[in-house]
Image (cartoon, rainbow, N blue to C red):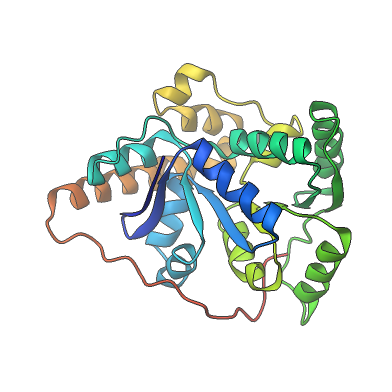
Amino acid sequence: MDAGKRSVLGVLVDAVDYDAAVAKVLHAAAARQPLSLTALAVHGVMTGVHDPVHNAHLNSIDVVVPDGQPVRWALNILHGTRLRDWVSGPELVLRVLRRMAEQGLPVYLYGATPQTLDRLVVSLSQRFPRLRIAGAEPSKFRTSLPGEELALADRIQGSGARLVLVGLGCPRQETFVYGMRQHLNLPLMAVGAAFDYHAGRLRPAPGWMQRSGLAWVWRFGQEPRRLWRRYLITNVDYLVRLVAQTAHPRRPRPPAPTTQRLESLPM
């Protein structure tokens, strides 16, 4: 299913399922075409709601998949899209990498700590023995120095990679894929906590919690000190705004996509 972009509180989210999202990434990888993709849950949507400039960047990303039941519910309630499932970032990564391995297309990993990245490489290599990992670089946890993003783009292109997975955390990774898209002729996927999940640092919520829209409770229980504001304040803000958008005839107008070049990128 691919019903195009729809506004959720002014953030444009694609009404797509797994098959459509995977097809878009694989087509760009095979054709050597630029593509930016991110998986937005409630927190990701709200980063755009609270920052109009960042919202314009989000609305410029080629594919924004609904990562989480609350975002899927919003698409169905507000726009009648009839999406049957959300598109989980970690699960999308596995489905894309399975196809990349089958087609012999190399992958580049960018983000996380050196320790997490090392564990991720081992985990992915065991899960997909035919997967070709062209390169892996940990995050520098700072903004780029002049020309640093161009040097990174050269390394990625020189590696022969046909896809970049980006695990910098929201909203840094969305800014990264927005800014790097103009430098690379290949897809970039901002995949949130997928690096931590597939490296074995985090355990996914049970299926029943995911289906009930309670995955955030499980995630909150794993890192309460870091995530309490995100889930106890941001989620309530999202629900209040969603009710208002549902009831009010004048819904938030999405900021127009932009091609503005960024002076620096999260690295």
Residue 17: x %, y % from top left = 46, 38
- On the rendered image, what quadrant is the C terminus found in? bottom right
x 68%, y 66%: residue: 266
Which image quarter holds the N terminus? top left
The picture places residue 140, in percent across and down from the top left corner, at: 79, 61
The residue depicted at 85 percent of the width and 33 percent of the height is 130
Q: Is residue 222 above or below residue 14?
A: above
Number of labelled discs? 0
**Looking at the picture, does residue 67 appear above or below residue 27?**
above
State left or right for residue 207 relative to residue 166: left
> Residue shown at 13%/54% (left/top)?
248
**Taking 181 as reference, is 126 above or below it?**
above
Q: Is residue 247 left or right of residue 9?
A: left
Q: Residue at x 86, y 30 (%)?
A: 129
The image shows residue 29 at horizontal and vertical percentages of 69, 53
- Comparing 157 with 258, the one in front is 157
Q: Position of residue 45 (x, y in %)?
A: 42, 53
Given residues 106 and 93, the one toward you in this image is 106
